[in-house]
Every structure is written in structure tokens, then in C-alpha cells.
Amino acid sequence: MSKIKITLRRSGIGFKIDQKRTIKALGLRRLNYSVIVDDNRTMRGMAIKIRHLVDVEELSE
């Protein structure tokens, strides 16, 4: 299965609580912190919800 790398680039301060919870659910702890997750509809949806705060990069295997 392919993977995507999600990196937190902006703080969640000043944004809606559901966006802050999405950041936490993805496991993003601080600025410039990255997580590698499976590329599925759930993770893509979470990344789209906070697309103004993160960078998403597809990883090749």
C-alpha cells in the first residue's frame, strides 16, 4: 500500500476546534513535525480538512 507524508506547517491556534482535533488525530505534535500514514480515503480526507495547515507529499515505495 502506498504512503503519504503529512507535515504540519502552520499552527492550529485561531482555527476551529474540529481542525485542532484533526491535527491531534493525525499525530502531529508541533510545527514541522511529520507523520507517514497509509494513503487511504480517511487519511486523505483528514489532510484535505486541514490543507491550509499542512503539506502532503506522496511517497514512492
Image: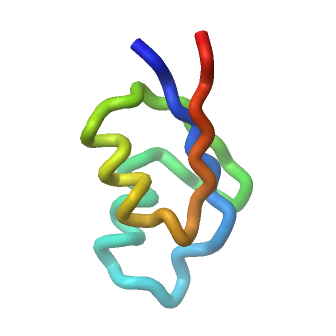
Residue 9 in percent (x, y) is at 68, 63
Residue 35, above or below 38: below
User: Is residue 30 toward the left or the right of residue 6 in the image?
Assistant: right
Residue found 50% across the figure and 89% down from its top: 14
Q: Is residue 29 left or right of residue 1?
A: right
Residue located 49% across and 63% down the image:
51
Q: Residue at x 54, y 71 (%)?
A: 52
Q: Is residue 42 above or below residue 2?
A: below
4 vs 17, nearest the viewer: 4
Q: Where does the image place residue 21, in percent across and percent down from the top left? A: 34, 64
Nearer to the camera, 31 or 3: 3
Q: Nearer the viewer, residue 45 or 31?
A: 45
- The count of marks equals 0
Vertical position of residue 21 compared to residue 38: above or below: below
* Quarter location, residue 18: bottom left
| Left or right of 18 on screen, residue 38 | right
Q: Which quadrant would the N terminus be assigned to in this image?
A: top left
- Say left or right for 48 vs 9: left
Q: Quadrant of residue 22?
A: bottom left
Task: Give the farthest residue toward the bottom.
Answer: 14
Q: Quadrant of residue 49?
A: bottom left
| Residue 18 in the image: above or below residue 28 | below
